[in-house]
Image (cartoon, helix red, strand yellow):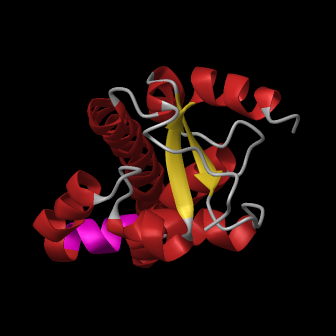
Amino acid sequence: MSNNLPDPATNPELFDGLLLRRGAAYVVDCAIILFITLAVMLVGLLFGILTLGVGFLALPFIVPFAILGYYAATLGSPVRATVGMRMMDIVLTPARGRPLDGWLILVHPLLFWTTVWISWPLSLLFVLFTPRRQMLHDLIVGTLMLRRSPMERHWRSLGQ
C-alpha cells in the first residue's frame, strides 16, 4: 500500500458514510445495467428475428460485453466513477501507487461480481472489518473507494 493513502483516523471525512454511499451507488448502477441489458436484448431480439434465429446466438456474448463497456467507459474516464458513484460522491482510487489502467478497470468489476456472486457475506465482512472500508475485490485489485469532494481537498493539501 502507498504511504500517501488517507487514513480514516486522520481523515475521517474521506470515509464518512462510505458504506451507505457504496450501497446506494450499487443500486443505481444495477438499474443502469438492467437498462443496458434490456436495450441490448431488444436490439438482439430484432437482430435475431431478422437473421431467422442466428442472431440469438450472439446475445450471451454481447450482453456481458455491453456491461463491461459501461464499466470501461465510466471507471476508465478521468472521473474514475460510475454514474451511481458520481451521484453518491465517491471515486475509485488506486491504493498501490500505480495508475488505474485498462486492465484494472476491467478486472475490478469482474472481481466484484464474482466475489459477490460466490460469497457476498464474506465480501461484506471485509468491508466491515478493514480500516479503509475496502471490499475483497478492492484488496485484490489494490483500489480504494473514497468520498470525492473531501478527497480532492486531501490531495491538494499534499501538493499532488
Q: Does residue 147 appear to the left or right of 69 in the view shown?
A: left
Q: Nearer the viewer, residue 65 or 13?
A: 13
- Magenta residues, dominant SS class: helix
Residue 47 x %, y %: 49, 59
Residue 80 x %, y %: 66, 43
Q: Does residue 16 appear to the left or right of 5 in the view shown?
A: left
Residue 77 occupies quadrant = top right
The magenta segment is 112-117
Q: Can residue 59 be seen at all in this image of the molecule? A: no
Residue 48 occupies quadrant = bottom left
Q: Which residue lies at the image location 74% right of the left edge and 64% below the top edge?
A: 97
**Residue furthest to the front:** 10
Look at the picture and state if 61 lies above or below 121.
below
Q: Is residue 115 magenta?
A: yes
Q: Nearer the viewer, residue 110 or 43?
A: 110
Q: Is residue 48 magenta?
A: no
Q: Nearer the viewer, residue 122 or 47?
A: 122
Q: Which residue lies at the image location 62% right of the left edge and 51% below the top edge?
A: 5
Q: Can residue 149 be seen at all in this image of the molecule? A: yes
Q: Which residue lies at the image location 55% right of the left edge and 60% below the top edge?
A: 143
Look at the picture and state if 111 lies above or below 95.
below
Residue 35 x %, y %: 38, 38
Q: Nearer the viewer, residue 119 or 153?
A: 153
